[in-house]
Image (cartoon, coloured by chain):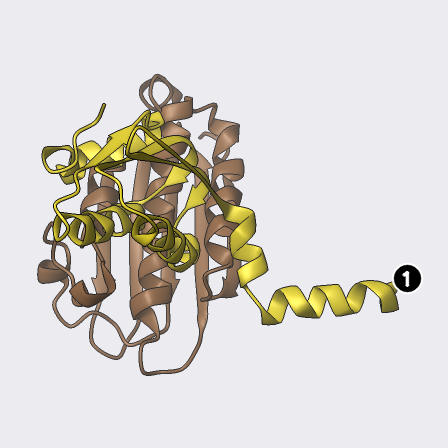
C-alpha cells in the first residue's frame, strides 16, 4: 500500500483567503511532482470552488468558514472544499455552463464547468440549508498509472 | 516595535484596497488612438472590484478607437476574470469601441478559450 499524505485547512470565507488557499493546495500538490500545467489546473479549480463559497455559500447567513481537505497518494490528489452555508437548491442546474444566479454582478457562470474540465473527477454534494461539499480529483500525468 | 507595526496592520485589514493593490497592478498608455492596458498579478474574485473600477476609469477617460488589454503579466486568472472582461466589452461595445486581448499566459488562455471569449474580443 502506498503512503499518502493529508492536509486540512480552515479559513474564514473572505476574499483575501482565495489566493492563500489555492497557493496552499498547490504547495501541497508539489509532492506529486506535477507539471506546471497541472499545478495551474489545480489552482484554478480550487479558486473556483473557494469563490463559490465566498460569493454564494453564506449569502444571507452572515459569515462562516471554508474547510479544504487534501490527500495525496498513488499519483492522485483529492481535494474537498466545503462550507456550512445555505447550500445549493439545484446542483444539476448550478453545474450547467454559463448558469449564474448573479448576472448583474458580471459572473460568468463557468465555475463548475472549469472544475469539471480542469480536474479528472468532480462531485458536488449539497442541499438547501445544509452546506456544500465539492470533491475533486486530479491524476498527475505519468504518475497515477504506475503508482498503485 | 509592535506598536509601530499595529497601525499599519489594522489599516490593511480595515481597508482591503491596499491588499487588492498587491494582487493586480494596472498599467496603461495611449498610442495612435489605441488604449493599451496591461494587467499584472492575480485576477480573482478578491481583485475583481478594484480591477473593474480601474479599467472603467481608464476606458472612459479620453476618446480612443480601440482598446487592447495585455494579459502577459497575469500570473493567475479564473472565471472571475472572464466576467470582468465581458463586462468591459459590453461597455465599450455601447460606444462602438472594439476590445482585443493580447499575450495571455497559458493558464489564462485555457480559461479564456473555454469561455469562447475570443469570438467577441479577438486574441492578437
Q: Position of residue B45 (x, y in %)?
A: 37, 56
Residue found 19% across the figure and 54% down from its top: B91
Residue A100 drawn above or below residue B101: below
A8 displayed left or right of A104: right
Q: What colour is chain B? A: yellow
Q: Position of residue B2 (x, y in %)?
A: 86, 65
Q: Colour of chain A?
A: brown
Judge from the rendering whether residue A133 lies leftward or rightward of residue B87; answer left or right: right
Q: Quadrant of residue B75?
A: top left
Q: Residue at x 12, y 45 (%)?
A: B96
Q: B17 or B113: which is nearer to us? A: B17
| Quadrant in which residue A91 is drawn | bottom left
Q: Is residue A128 above or below residue B70?
A: below
Q: Name the residue that disc number 1 marks.
A: B1
Residue that extends furthest to the bottom in the rendered view of this protein: A61
Snapshot quadrant of residue A115: top left
Q: Which element is circle 1 on? A: loop
- x then y, percent, for residue A32: 47, 27
Query: On what subunit does the disc labeled 1 rest?
Result: B
Q: Position of residue B77 (x, y in %)?
A: 36, 41
Name the foreground residue: B36 vs A96: B36
Residue A6 visible in rendering:
no
Q: Is residue A51 above or below residue B30?
A: below
Horizontally, residue B91 falls left or right of residue A10, namely left
Which image quarter is the N terminus of chain A in? top left
Amino acid at each position: 500500500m502506498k503512503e499518502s499524505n493529508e492536509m486540512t485547512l480552515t479559513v474564514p470565507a473572505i476574499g483575501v483567503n482565495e489566493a492563500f488557499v489555492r497557493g496552499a493546495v498547490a504547495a501541497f500538490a508539489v509532492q506529486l511532482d506535477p507539471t506546471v500545467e497541472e499545478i495551474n489546473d489545480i489552482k484554478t479549480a480550487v479558486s473556483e470552488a473557494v469563490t463559490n463559497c465566498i460569493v454564494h455559500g453564506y449569502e444571507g447567513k452572515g459569515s462562516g468558514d471554508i474547510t479544504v481537505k487534501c490527500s495525496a497518494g498513488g499519483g492522485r490528489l483529492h481535494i474537498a472544499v466545503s462550507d456550512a452555508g445555505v447550500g445549493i437548491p439545484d446542483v444539476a442546474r448550478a453545474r450547467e455552463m454559463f448558469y449564474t444566479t448573479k448576472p448583474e454582478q458580471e459572473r460568468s457562470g463557468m465555475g463548475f464547468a472549469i472544475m469539471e474540465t480542469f480536474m479528472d473527477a468532480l462531485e458536488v454534494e449539497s442541499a438547501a440549508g445544509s452546506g456544500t461539499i465539492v470533491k475533486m480529483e486530479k491524476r498527475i500525468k505519468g504518475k497515477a498509472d504506475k503508482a498503485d | 516595535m509592535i506598536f509601530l507595526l499595529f497601525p499599519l496592520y489594522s489599516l490593511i485589514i480595515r481597508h482591503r484596497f491596499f491588499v487588492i493593490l498587491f494582487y493586480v497592478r494596472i498599467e496603461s498608455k495611449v498610442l495612435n488612438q489605441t488604449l493599451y492596458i496591461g494587467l499584472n498579478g492575480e485576477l480573482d474574485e478578491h481583485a475583481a472590484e478594484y480591477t473593474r473600477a480601474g479599467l472603467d476609469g481608464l476606458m472612459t477617460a479620453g476618446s480612443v478607437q480601440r482598446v487592447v488589454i495585455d494579459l502577459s503579466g497575469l500570473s493567475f486568472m479564473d472565471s472571475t476574470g472572464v466576467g470582468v472582461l465581458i463586462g468591459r466589452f459590453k461597455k465599450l461595445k455601447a460606444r462602438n469601441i472594439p476590445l482585443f486581448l493580447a499575450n495571455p499566459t497559458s493558464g489564462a488562455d485555457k480559461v479564456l478559450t473555454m469561455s469562447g471569449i475570443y469570438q467577441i474580443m479577438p486574441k492578437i
